[in-house]
Image (spheres, rainbow, N blue to C red):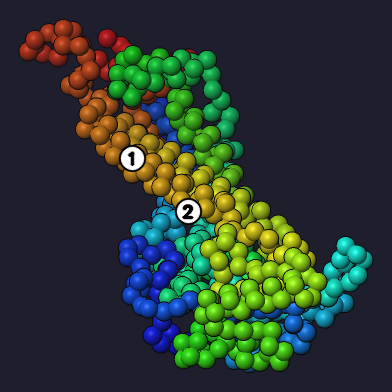
């Protein structure tokens, strides 16, 4: 895949400086998904398969229009269909295009132990480098959106690239290109935020959705994919969209306090043992009768031949 | 008869030494120790970006990730073997409590101040139980980390548990191992050899495991 001129501003498990941080004047890019105008046509699903040359797999029918229960290693873009009953008893059919959210603080990248296997380019795209992936699946644990998917044959993890190859060449992602209703938009994060807020305001003021809003969760530093939702108080109704996503606290605990405490303890232990050795040294060799360094000097006759062999330490 | 290979534990060999570890125990210990060292080094490579090079040296990060769980099974099986072999000798006794209280003298190499210990002193027993306890945690969390892709989204708490418990238990064992290696290789002359060839001198037994020595010599003289 072409990375063209994109540089790297975040990199997984990298000792030392980050290769491209602050070296490129590049605005953050963003997808805007207006769930209120999505008709569930799945053109974006097809476009994703086509552009990324993903091999076909079996679909799963479970009495909904949804193609399969969740995204797969070879199915990165999936519209989730949800029947939602509102408080007044009326029914809403919620459709949410689900894919990688391209978090500003990516949990996958945070959890990854392999140098450079997950990177975030200066335009905010989070991308997996399968040649450096070791297949541990820690990214699956780190992601709050259930996005990275494991391929059992290649032992690598895959997900949406936000069409980094297209974006680098100045094109919009394939899903955006294919959308027939204009519910998908692509541009800089600032532009998309403006568009999203305007649309949310419109929904609040003219369409009787007083809780309409923009989903750009702060818990992961904001995302490179924003949603306009009819009801920000009901995010879970959109196929389990977490209302306040964040990197799991156990991953945070493991990667920060525990790592530093553990490293300090291991290093301190090594140094401590070395100091013990040069301070106290080894214990007397029980088989060497000349070694009596712990005997008080008074008990030793001066210069005379060694007293009767004190073999055991307690036998004096 | 090859005494070292076939003599029972606590036998007094023709050279007057006591067989502390039978061949079977030594083999068991080194299968466990070899597996542990591989697990520790590959684990450290995954633990810290600064140590990632260890994985490269050991055949590549992908290979390390593939082999680590299998070697983990070897470790788990040999630890179970150790548990079956040694657990009955590892229960703390009244003498151990006295020994524990005098720990400060032990650390300062003032062995003559130490109350007598049995076949294993309390430090060795703590090492044993520490490894058994951490071994169970490592196995449980390790199985989850082996196949994270099979853990459904609704059970993701299992993964959160595993990524925290696995390194925590591993760190504890590294602490135990540092002390274990220091004591057996550097601090106690004769200890390392006892796990290689099996025997310790009577002086070693009398110095470090006096109650055990008295029992062995006593029962030998009764025969």
Furthest toward the front, the residue is A205
Please say whether residue B193 is visible from this viewpoint: no
> Mark on residue A268?
1
Can the viewer see residue A19 in this picture? yes
Q: Is residue A83 left or right of residue B46?
A: right
Q: Which mark is residue A255?
A: 2
Sequence-wise, which precedes: disc 1 or disc 2? 2
Residue A84 falls in image quadrant: bottom right
Q: Chain of mark 1?
A: A
Q: Which circle marks residue A195 in the picture?
A: none
Q: Depth check: give the residue in front, B2 or B135.
A: B135
Q: Residue at x 41, y 82 (%)?
A: A6
Q: Residues within 10 Å of mark 2 (few under 14, many from 20)?
A: some
Q: Is A81 situated above or below B149?
A: below
| Picture coordinates of residue A253, whole percent (x, y) | 52, 49
Q: Quarter holding the N terminus of chain B?
A: top left
Measured from the top left, where is residue B18 in percent x and y?
39, 28
Q: Is residue A125 above or below residue A236?
A: below
In front of the other: B44 or B191? B44
- Which element type, helix, strand or loop, lies under badge 2? helix
Residue at 35% x, 71% y is A22
Mark 1, Cα crowd under 10 Å, few <14 / some 14-19 / many 20+, is: few
Image-based side of B114 in relation to A200, left or right: left
């Amino acid at each position: 895949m072409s990375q063209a001129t994109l540089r790297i501003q975040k990199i997984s498990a990298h000792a030392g400086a980050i290769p491209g941080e602050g070296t490129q004047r590049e605005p953050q890019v963003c997808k805007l998904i207006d769930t209120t105008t999505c008709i569930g046509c799945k053109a974006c699903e097809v476009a994703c398969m086509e552009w990324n040359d993903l091999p076909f797999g079996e679909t799963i029918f479970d009495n909904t229009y949804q193609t399969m229960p969740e995204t797969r290693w070879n199915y990165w873009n999936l519209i989730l269909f949800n029947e939602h009953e509102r408080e007044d008893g009326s029914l809403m059919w919620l459709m949410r295009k689900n894919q990688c959210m391209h978090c500003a603080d990516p949990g996958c990248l945070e959890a990854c132990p392999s140098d450079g296997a997950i990177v975030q380019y200066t335009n905010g795209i989070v991308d997996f480098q399968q040649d450096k992936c070791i297949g541990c699946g820690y990214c699956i644990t780190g992601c709050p959106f259930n996005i990275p998917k494991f391929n059992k044959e290649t032992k690598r993890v895959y997900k949406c690239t936000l069409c980094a190859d297209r974006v680098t060449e100045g094109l919009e992602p394939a899903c955006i290109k294919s959308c027939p209703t204009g519910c998908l938009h692509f541009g800089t994060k600032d532009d998309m935020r403006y568009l999203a807020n305007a649309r949310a305001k419109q929904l609040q003021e003219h369409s009787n959705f007083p809780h309409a809003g923009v989903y750009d969760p702060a818990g992961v530093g904001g995302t490179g994919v924003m949603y306009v939702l009819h009801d920000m108080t009901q995010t879970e109704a959109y196929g389990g969209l977490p209302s306040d996503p964040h990197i799991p606290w156990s991953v945070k605990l493991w990667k920060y306090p525990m790592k530093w405490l553990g490293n300090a303890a291991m290093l301190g232990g090594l140094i401590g043992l070395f100091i013990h050795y040069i301070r106290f040294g080894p214990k007397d060799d029980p088989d060497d009768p000349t070694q009596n360094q712990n005997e008080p000097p008074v008990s030793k006759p001066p210069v005379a031949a060694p007293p009767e062999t004190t073999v055991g330490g307690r036998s004096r | 008869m090859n005494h070292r290979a076939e003599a029972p534990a606590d036998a007094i060999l023709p050279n007057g030494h006591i067989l502390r570890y039978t061949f079977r125990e030594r083999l068991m210990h080194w299968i466990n120790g070899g597996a542990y060292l591989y697990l520790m080094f590959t684990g450290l490579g995954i633990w810290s970006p600064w140590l990632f090079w260890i994985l490269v040296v050991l055949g590549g990060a992908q290979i390390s990730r593939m082999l680590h769980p299998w070697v983990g099974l070897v470790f788990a099986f040999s630890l179970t073997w150790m548990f079956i072999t040694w657990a009955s000798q590892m229960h703390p006794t009244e003498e151990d409590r006295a020994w524990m209280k005098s720990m400060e003298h032990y650390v300062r190499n003032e062995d003559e101040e130490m109350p007598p210990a049995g076949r294993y002193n309390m430090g060795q027993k703590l090492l044993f139980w520490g490894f058994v306890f951490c071994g169970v945690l490592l196995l449980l969390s390790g199985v989850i980390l082996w196949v994270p892709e099979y853990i459904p989204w609704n059970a993701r708490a299992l993964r959160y548990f595993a990524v925290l418990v696995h390194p925590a238990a591993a760190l504890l064992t590294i602490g135990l191992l540092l002390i274990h290696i220091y004591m057996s290789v550097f601090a106690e002359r004769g200890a390392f050899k006892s796990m290689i060839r099996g025997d310790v001198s009577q002086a070693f037994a009398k110095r470090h495991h006096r109650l055990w020595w008295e029992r062995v010599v006593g029962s030998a003289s009764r025969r």
